[in-house]
Image (tube, grey):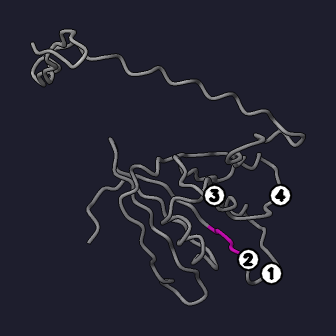
Amino acid sequence: MRDNPEGTMMERVRPRSSLLEMLKPAEAPPTPTPEPEPVANVEGEPASGEAIIPLPQPGDPYDTAHARSSNKPLPTLRFIKGDGIKGLPYANLDSIDWEPAEKPGHGPTIVVRFAGIVAREARISGRNLLQLFDLLSYHRVAWVRELPPGRDFKDGKATVITDITVGLITEVPA
């Protein structure tokens, strides 16, 4: 101890040991404040954030071959064929390939492979698929839909999916 100019005793200040700090029990992290539920606007979509991209219902007109592109990556890609829907997680997306048409007059095929508990492959065939290929590679499409049999578009520039097949991968592709 030492005297200060006023004549009172002042204790010597020592730095705290870092070892003592490590022995203290860890403090609980602060509890996060829950985010408020988004309020729906007049159209029924969330008022803030990314709107949910609805699936077309059975019997809906084939206005488009795929969902509008999202500005954020999506969790699942859904394949709609007739009244059936199969969803595969983008997290398991292993590869996406572009295969040119095998025969004249046929369109190209997008091959999307998913690794998971069971390895699956989706083959999407049609016309004007290049933009869809690009959007799929960025995980920005919520669903793709096969054109119902006996229907077609008049616009030659529209994306048209003529066939979707989803199956197990039985052999490793080259």
Residue at 68 percent of width and 45 percent of height: 49
Name the residue tied to disc 2.
158
Name the residue tied to disc 3.
70
Whichever of labels 3 and 1 marks the residue nearer the N terminus, that label is: 3
Disc 1 secondary structure class: loop
Amino acid type, callout 2:
Ala
Whichever of labels 4 and 3 marks the residue nearer the N terminus, that label is: 4
Relative image position of residue 144 (x, y in whole percent):
62, 58
Residue at 82 percent of width and 52 percent of height: 60
Amino acid type, callout 3:
Ser
Whichever of labels 1 and 4 marks the residue nearer the N terminus, that label is: 4
Which of the labelled discs sits on residue 61, or is there none? 4
Q: In which quarter of the image is the C terminus?
A: bottom left
Distance, label 3 to label 1, CA atoms, is 24 Å
In this view of the protein, which residue sits in the foreground, 140 or 159? 140
Whichever of labels 3 and 2 marks the residue nearer the N terminus, that label is: 3
Q: Does the magenta stretch include residue 9?
A: no
In this view of the protein, which residue sits in the foreground, 58 or 114? 114
Tally of numbered tags: 4
- In the image, taking residue 17 as reference, residue 154 lies left or right, namely right
Q: Find the magenta span and give its range.
A: 158-162
Relative image position of residue 121 (x, y in whole percent):
42, 58
Amino acid type, callout 4:
Pro
Asked if labels 1 and 3 touch by Cβ distance under 8 angstroms, the answer is no
Disc 2 secondary structure class: loop
Query: In terms of secondary structure, what is the magenta stretch mainly?
Result: strand
- Most extreme residue toward the top is 8
Name the residue tied to disc 1.
155
Taking 147 as reference, is 30 above or below it? above
**Circle nearer the viewer, 4 or 2:** 2
Judge the density around disc 1: few (<14), some (14-19), many (≥20) Cα neighbours within 10 Å: few
